[in-house]
Image: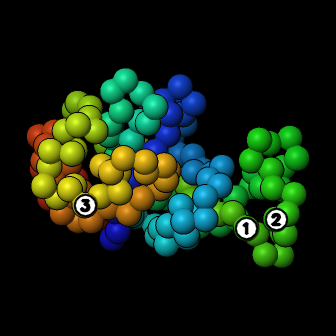
Amino acid sequence: MAYWLIKSEPDVFSYADLVRAGREPWNGIRNYQARNFLRQMRLGDLCLFYHSNAKPPGVVGVARVVGESQPDDLQFDPSSAYFDPRSDSADPRWSMVEVAPHRELPRLLTLPELRELSAWQDSPLTRPGTRLSVLPVTPEQMQAALEAVGLNPAELLAP
């Protein structure tokens, strides 16, 4: 199992929206490095769900990958803001996965709190200027984040 962090602005799509939807495509990603991370995701992988551009920003829940990488449907939709006229259906440029809610955190784990956790010292998330909406998370980072909000990682991370 691999671990990830996925970012969304809560006024665009929040963890509560994911809970209401039950499962949702993680589409509209238009950064090649983030796209490559989406292509590495596998069924069952867990994702920290991070509210960006919020006051304060932070992790609010855990999602599970329930649909592996496939072509992003929005790249071919001319009415979408994520339409890419240069993407070829024979060799799609952009990818997406499907995620479902796994567990809401008992409280928000803020970015300043993450910066204080030793496991997160070398994370791109805690460095200024990181804009990627999908990032890999180490097992140590996942465990530290869950423990910081009082959760037992062994219970939550079981397949």
Q: Residue furthest front?
A: 128
Residue shown at the point (50%, 34%) measured from the top left: 9
Q: Nearer the viewer, mark 1 or mark 3?
A: 3
Residue shown at the point (84%, 69%) measured from the top left: 89
Residue 109 showing in the rendered view: no
Mark 2 and mark 1: span between their CA atoms?
5 Å
Q: Is residue 50 left or right of residue 71?
A: left
Q: Is residue 58 left or right of residue 70?
A: left
- Could you tell which of marks 2 and 1 lies nearer the N-terminus? 2
Mark 1 and mark 3: span between their CA atoms?
30 Å
Residue 157, image quadrant: bottom left
Which element type, helix, strand or loop, lies under badge 3? loop
Q: Are marks 2 and 1 in contact (CB under 8 Å)?
A: yes
Q: Is residue 83 left or right of residue 51?
A: right
Mark 3 and mark 2: span between their CA atoms?
34 Å
Residue shown at the point (55%, 55%) measured from the top left: 98
Task: Say which amino acid is labelled 3.
Answer: Asp
Q: Which residue is mark 3?
A: 122
Q: Which residue is mark 1?
A: 93
Which element type, helix, strand or loop, lies under badge 1? loop
Q: Which residue is mark 2?
A: 87
Q: How many marks?
A: 3
- Could you tell which of marks 3 and 2 lies nearer the N-terminus? 2
Q: Are marks 1 and 3 in contact (CB under 8 Å)?
A: no
Coloration mode: rainbow
Q: Is residue 79 left or right of residue 51?
A: right
Measuring from the top left, give residue 58's x and y in whole percent: 32, 36
Residue nearest the viewer, comparing 64 with 4: 4
